[in-house]
Amino acid sequence: MSPAVGARFLHLGGLRTALYNYLFAKQRGGTFILRLEDTDQSRLIPGAADDIEDMLEWAGIPPDESRRRGGGYGPYVQSERLQLYSQAASVLLQTGHAYYCFCSNQRLDLLKREAQRSGQVPRYDNRCRELPPEQVQQKLAQGVPCVIRFKLVSGPEMFQDLVFSWTRHDPAAVEGDPVILKADGFPTYHLASVVDDHAMRISHVLRGSEWLISTAKHLQLFRALRWTPPAYAHLPLLLNRDGTKLSKRQGDIFVQRFREQGVLPETLLDIVTHAGSGFSDNWIGRRLDELVCKFNISKITTHSALLDLDKLDEFSRVHLQHRIEDEERCAVLRDELRQQVLHTHGSRISDSTVLEPHYMQRVLQLRKGHVCSLRELLNDTHTYLWIRPQVTRQQLQEVSAEVDDIAAAVIQLVASGDSFESTEHLNTELKLIACRLKHTKYSGAMRVLRLALSAQQQGPSVAEMMLSLGEQEVCVRLQKALEH
């Protein structure tokens, strides 16, 4: 059982297709194959093949067999399998299911323009289908450029799709005989996919619904070659929230872009499955093992899936919190955060203590559920975590004349040794301090402390700031502000 998927640079639609293939294969003990379809040489993008596999590995859904990993049914790049396609085309020629077509590009363009002028759908008129054998041989001997076309059989082709149920389509009624082998010796997708599905013993193909109407042609090819076709499941389109098509020109739909922005892979997997169907219920925060367990292909609906990227932050917060709460994965987060802090702030770091694991751990635990990514901990709001602020006594006195009393009370609170148990407990103690002030309300006292600790007017609560920085650093910053 071997679902297969192919693409160029991996975008969210391709990721969802790959993920559903992965879920289907893993749930049934099958093999997830990555097959690179590069037969259209004019559209090849340098580096795309590596990007696809890199992104699948990063997302946590690596293929079992691929160009990089190998396998028993390689090669896994179609341009390296040309002999197989040529052999299949020869068989179709010999059995009368295909023929040589010598029509020039100029003639084909003319047919297209005439159809458009008359308001018809452009289609090939099958002119070369009835060429006499001697004329065919003469043109081949003369080296006239040609392609090989497959003879479509008239009449509706019925097949049962795992998503769209029973489907019928008569390709011969709406289009001419399709090219299966081009003049450059490369196959079209129609022939290549059929040959590869047979040679690689593919049992199930999960692909985008844009290929649904082509399936009738593929089934005719299988029948002409006397091969058994795989089962097909065509996935509904993944659209923007407003119903418009995801466009590669948007730029922000490529998986690499999300990775660069610090989005966790499990966040992307969750949001693309959340947008569509295939599950009895949805909840934010699903892990990959839960997706494998809960996936049900019979639950996939035929209507398009709407992707709401406005909810990406919500998904990200939940998944980052799950990582922080997992001891093993949190250790990886601490290392990543340390590297990012060094890269962003470098020599501006005031005290190397902020780079130690226990400090990173404290920051992550206090900020979980509030931030969407590690990169958010490097923005201006969180600079105070890594760099001591430059605040003058005069700035503090502009907020309250009782700066000395506030600072002294907090330093005494720290010295008591039991105030840093939790934000709730510390908040209670800070309110008691404010109650003892003569002219400053609680809000004013908090503004003084916030300014002294971070040089900012907003951000996390003062209690959380204090817990993040730690008892010693709180005292250092308060004393420094008073002396400045």
Image (cartoon, rainbow, N blue to C red):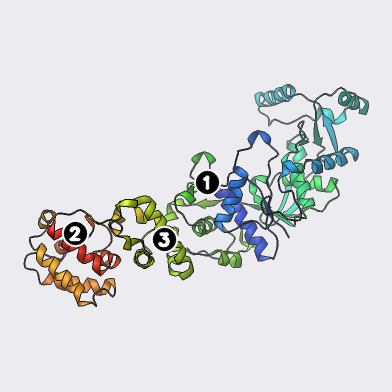
- Residue hosting label 3: 317
- Residue 51 left/right relative to 215: left
Seen in the picture, residue 149 relative to 391 is either above or below; the reply is above
Work out whether mark 2 precedes mark 3 in sequence or the reverse, and give the earlier one: 3
Camera-nearest residue between 377 and 17: 377
Q: Mark 3 Cα within 10 Å, few/some/many (few <14, many 20+)?
A: many
Q: Could you say whether the residue bearing mark 3 is in a helix, strand or loop?
A: helix
Camera-nearest residue between 139 and 411: 411
- Residue hosting label 1: 254
- Residue hosting label 2: 452
Work out whether mark 2 precedes mark 1 in sequence or the reverse, and give the earlier one: 1
Label pair 1/3, CB-CB below 8 angstroms: no
Name the quadrant containing residue 338. bottom left
Magenta: main secondary structure: loop
Q: Which residues fall within the magenta stretch?
A: 437-443
Indicate the position of residue 147 as horizontal and vertical percent values. 79, 31
At label 2, the amino acid type is Ala
Q: CA distance from mark 2 to mark 3?
A: 29 Å
Work out whether mark 1 precedes mark 3 in sequence or the reverse, and give the earlier one: 1
Camera-nearest residue between 326 and 167: 326
Q: Could you say whether the residue bearing mark 1 is in a helix, strand or loop?
A: loop
Indicate whether residue 264 is drawn in magenta: no
Residue depicted at 61% across the width and 58% down the height: 300
Label pair 2/3, CB-CB below 8 angstroms: no
Q: Could you say whether the residue bearing mark 2 is in a helix, strand or loop?
A: helix
- Residue 261 left/right relative to 69: left
At label 3, the amino acid type is Arg
Task: Tell me, for residue 150, which label it has, or none.
Answer: none
Residue depicted at 22% across the width and 65% down the height: 474
- Residue 410 left/right relative to 320: left
